[in-house]
């Protein structure tokens, strides 16, 4: 019997997410294996396993602890269903769930799912390691820090300090490396965790602040180069740097990013990679260096071209900042993808018109902007732990339950627009899936420098 089986759940309807190697479970597996525990992983997303196929795989790999990665909020309901089905099938493992949404929903999850034993809150390496030690030694585990549990008729959590020194963690386990090489996909790596921003719609900052640590923490440039060089020696040339925000705060963040680029150039590694960052982190000189080191694409968190909406999102940038960042990347001929939220609960029709008009103008006049937008009608998703979720809850406008939050647009014209777009998308979903896969293939060719 395994000590631990780690499972990343699959969410098949996702169109915009390339099926990349899961770093969350890989870091957990590496930390456990370093202490001698027998650990296996099932990446149901990467393997495109159905719900029933995932259940069958779990049943074929008995383990003392089963950890489910609920990496999307929309997977909360699926995780609850899976726990119930596994218990009905006779699974006696200690079942725990983790990731962003469970961290903020641990009370609801434990109260409503008797088959669930615990919830790992925050970063999981040291919490899961201590839980595994207790379970394997037959010792009580209810007082493990970072673990939400039931006891005395209530749910409780003793907060664990954040993982502050990322270099103390072993490199992520590479069980799926042959799979990635065979499919010719990007290899995911993390050079940092978290984001120093406080955007109201995003759960990243609250998640990493939960343990009392800095909201953005990083591997040293030398550690980053070591991981890249080791993978490159095994035939990996194309990387997805999965940091929420690759470039950290202030001068120190930019200097670290610069040093990573310099080390890649000094090592003469022929690689390509993409990153995500805030618009106020885009610096011409820095990004010119990163391009020379192999940067092929940037995911840019623009979110809006309305000053009022940027302020409501607490982006702490201006429309001018957004446009300047796009202009710099366009002039450097670095392709970019825009994160954009056109609609939110309080969006007015006038605000929508303003934002869409400015967006059309930017797409006409700013280099690279014409092909940068993934979704011109995206509506904000309400995630647990976020400022916008708390605001809606406080004004009694938060709808749904912990599995799927919803809201009603205040402006009836915005409500009508969103309804019409949603209905059209439902009719064209197969086409959208085909287009999304075509875009992913094109991005892979772009990363490889293929025509």
Image (tube, rainbow, N blue to C red):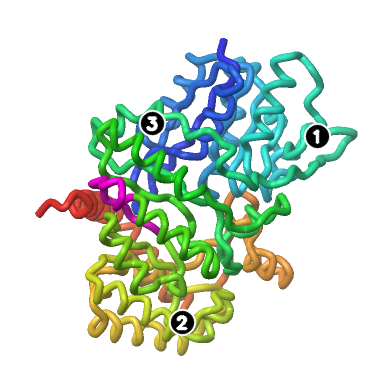
Q: Secondary structure at mark 1?
A: strand
In the image, residue 379 sits, relative to residue 316, either above or below, namely above
Report the front residue among 5 and 418.
5
Tag on residue 150?
1
Q: Position of residue 417 (x, y in %)?
A: 41, 75
Q: Position of residue 416 (x, y in %)?
A: 44, 76
Question: In screen coordinates, is 211 left or right of 33?
Answer: right
| Residue matched to label 3 | 49
Answer above or below: position of 302 versus 11.
below
Q: Which residues are magenta?
A: 264-275
* Residue 99 is a magenta residue: no
Magenta stretch containing residue 269, yes or no? yes
**Neighbours of disc 2 within 10 Å: few (<14), some (14-19), many (20+):** some
In 3D space, how far apart are the residues under numbered discs 1 and 2 (Cα atoms)? 46 Å
Q: Determine the image quadrant of residue 128.
A: top right
Of labels 1 and 2, earlier in sequence is 1
Q: Mark 3 vs mark 2: which is more N-terminal? A: 3
| Local secondary structure at mark 3 | loop
């Amino acid at each position: 019997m395994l000590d631990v089986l780690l499972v990343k759940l699959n969410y098949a309807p996702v169109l915009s997410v390339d099926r990349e190697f899961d770093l969350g479970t890989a870091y957990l597996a590496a930390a456990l294996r370093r202490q001698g525990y027998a650990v296996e992983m099932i990446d149901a997303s990467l393997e495109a396993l159905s719900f029933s196929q995932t259940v069958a795989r779990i049943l074929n790999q008995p383990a003392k602890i089963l950890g489910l990665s609920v990496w999307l909020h929309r997977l909360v309901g699926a995780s609850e269903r899976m726990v119930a089905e596994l218990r009905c099938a006779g699974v006696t493992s200690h079942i725990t769930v983790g990731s962003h949404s469970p961290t903020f929903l641990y009370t609801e999850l434990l109260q409503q799912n008797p088959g669930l034993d615990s919830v790992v809150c925050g970063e999981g390496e040291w919490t899961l390691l201590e839980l595994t030690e207790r379970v394997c030694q037959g010792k009580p585990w209810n007082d493990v820090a970072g673990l939400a549990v039931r006891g005395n008729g209530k749910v409780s959590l003793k907060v664990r300090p954040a993982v502050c020194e990322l270099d103390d963690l072993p490199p992520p386990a590479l069980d799926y490396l042959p799979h990635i090489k065979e499919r010719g996909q990007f290899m995911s790596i993390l050079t940092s965790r978290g984001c120093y921003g406080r955007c109201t719609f995003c759960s990243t900052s609250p998640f990493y602040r939960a343990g009392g640590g800095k909201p953005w923490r990083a591997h040293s440039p030398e550690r980053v180069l070591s991981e890249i060089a080791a993978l490159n020696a095994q035939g990996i040339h194309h990387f997805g740097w999965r940091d929420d925000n690759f470039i950290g705060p202030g001068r120190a963040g930019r200097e670290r990013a610069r040093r990573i680029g310099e080390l890649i150039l000094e090592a003469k590694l022929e690689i390509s990679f993409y990153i995500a960052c805030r618009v106020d982190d885009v610096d011409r000189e820095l990004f010119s260096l990163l391009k020379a080191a192999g940067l092929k694409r940037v995911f840019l968190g623009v979110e809006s071209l309305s000053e009022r909406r940027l302020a409501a999102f607490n982006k702490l940038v201006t429309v001018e900042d957004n446009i300047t960042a796009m202009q710099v990347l366009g002039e450097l001929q670095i392709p970019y993808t825009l994160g954009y939220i056109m609609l939110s609960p309080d969006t007015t029709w006038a605000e929508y018109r303003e934002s869409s008009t400015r967006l059309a103008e930017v797409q006409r006049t700013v280099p690279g902007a014409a092909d940068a937008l993934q979704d011109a009608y995206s509506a904000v998703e309400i995630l647990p732990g976020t400022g916008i979720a708390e605001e809606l809850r406080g004004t009694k406008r938060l709808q749904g339950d912990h599995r799927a939050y919803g809201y009603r647009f205040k402006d009836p014209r915005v409500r009508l627009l969103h309804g019409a777009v949603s209905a059209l998308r439902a009719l064209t979903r197969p086409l959208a899936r085909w287009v999304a896969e075509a875009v992913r293939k094109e991005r892979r060719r772009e990363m490889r420098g293929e025509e």
